[in-house]
Amino acid sequence: MTTLKTWVNVPHNSDFSIYNLPFGNFSVNDDQPRAGIAIGTQIIDLVVVSELGLIEVNANYFNQSTLNEFIALGKKITNKVRLDIQQLLVIENSPLKNHPEAFVQQKDATMHLPVQVGDYTDFYSSIEHATNVGKMFRDPENALLPNWRHIPVGYHGRASSIVVSGTNIHRPMGQVKTNEMETPVFQASGRLDFELEMGFIVGKTTQLGNRITVENASEHIFGLVLFNDWSARDIQKWEYVPLGPFLGKSFASSMSPWIVTLEALEPFKVQGPKQDPAVLSYLQYDGAKNYDIQLEVGLSSKSSEETIISCSNFKYMYWNMMQQLAHHTVNGCNVNVGDVMASGTISGKDESSYGSLLEISWGGKKPFELKDGSKRTFIEDNDTITLKGFAEKEGVRVGFGEVTGTILPSK
C-alpha cells in the first residue's frame, strides 16, 4: 500500500484518513445541502473546490441536495474527483492551502441523507444470524430453510423511511399476538430491536431486462454505508407469514451519512466463507469478494453511558455484495443510481458478535447488563443505539464514522 502524507491535521485513528475520502452531503447554517468529502475532523466543500477550478466537474453537480447526479456521472469521473482531492491534500504546494473557505469543520455542519433512495432491498445473508433465528423459531436441527444456501434471500423494503444518522425514531405501533393470546391487540412494540448491517449504494442505472453479473457487479456499486435496520420483533412475528416483513420493519432504517467508495476499501478485500453446496453458475465467483470491516454496536440510556454490546465483522457474510446484486437482477429487474441494498444482520460465530438483540438476549430469555447495572432484553424508550465500523491494515484506517438513533416513545 502506497504511503500517503497529508498536510491537513488528521487525528490519530481517524476514520476519515487520507486513504478514505468518503462522499457525503452537508449544510451549514440552514444553507442548501451540498456535496463534500470528509478528511479528519473537516469537510472539503466540493462546490468551492470546483468553482476554484481545481477539479474538472462542474459545481452544479455538487450543489445538489443529494449525490445522485454526481454518482450518475460514472466511476471514471467520480474516482478521478476523489483522487484529485487526495492529490491536493498531499502535495506540498497545494493551492488548497490558500483557500480556507474550502474547509468546513464537521462539528459545524449538519449531515443529510447522501442519496435520494428510490428503492431499498434488505438481504438475509449472514449464515450465523439465519441459523440463530432458525434455532429460536424453528427446528434447531434444521435451522436454515431449504433455499438459504442456494440463493441470497432478500425482500423489498420501504425506501421512504430511510433516515440519516442522528434522526430520532418513535417506537412503532402495530398488531401483536403472543402465543398466550387468542386474538391480536394493537399496541406499541415491546420487543424493539436494532440490526447491525452494511448497505451498498447502486452507482449505475440499468435497463429493464438486463442482468448484472458477479464479475462486473463492482462497476455498479458506488460505495458502502453503515445501516441499522430497526426491527419490531413482536409486530414482525405476527405479520411475516406468508409474505414476510412489513410494518415490523418499514417504520425506520438509519443510514450513516458518509459513503465509503469501493476503491477506498480495495486493500481490505478477503475471501468469504466456503459456500456448500456449490452455487449455481450465475452466482459463482473467483477471488476475494468479502471485506474485512470491523463493526461495533453500543447502547446508551438516560441513566447509563454507552455499553458495547456487539463486536462483529462484515467478512463473515456468507453471500457477498456481488452475488446479491447479480441475484437481484438475474430476472431482468432494473436498478437505479441511489438504490440501497442492505446486507441483512451481520452476526459472527460467538455471542459477543451477534448483530441483534434478538440473538444477544436469545429472544428475551437472557437479559444483559448495562454499565449502570440496569438490564435489557430489547430497546427501551430513550435508549440510543450507535453502530461504528472501520477497516484497518498496515497502519492504514478507512472508517465509516457512525450511525446513531434514539428511540422515543410512541406518538
Image: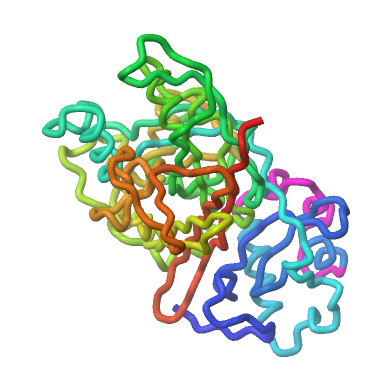
The C terminus sits in image quarter: top right
Q: Is residue 55 magenta?
A: yes
- Please state if 16 lies on the left or on the right of 185 as rendered: right
The residue under the point 64% across, 84% down is 6
Q: Which residues are magenta?
A: 52-75
- Please state if 401 lies on the left or on the right of 43 as rendered: left
- Please state if 349 lies on the left or on the right of 251 as rendered: left
Q: Is residue 216 magenta?
A: no
Is residue 22 placed above or below 404 in the rendered structure? below
Task: Give the x, y percent position of residue 264.
Answer: 52, 65
Q: What colouring method underlies this structural image? A: rainbow
The N terminus sits in image quarter: bottom left
Of 334 and 166, nearer the camera is 166
The residue under the point 29% across, 53% down is 348
Could you say which quadrant of the image residue 96 lies in? bottom right
Could you say which quadrant of the image residue 124 lies in? top left
Of 194 and 34, nearer the camera is 194
The residue under the point 66% across, 72% down is 39
Outermost residue toward the top in this view: 183
The residue under the point 45% across, 40% down is 193
Residue 337 visible in image: no
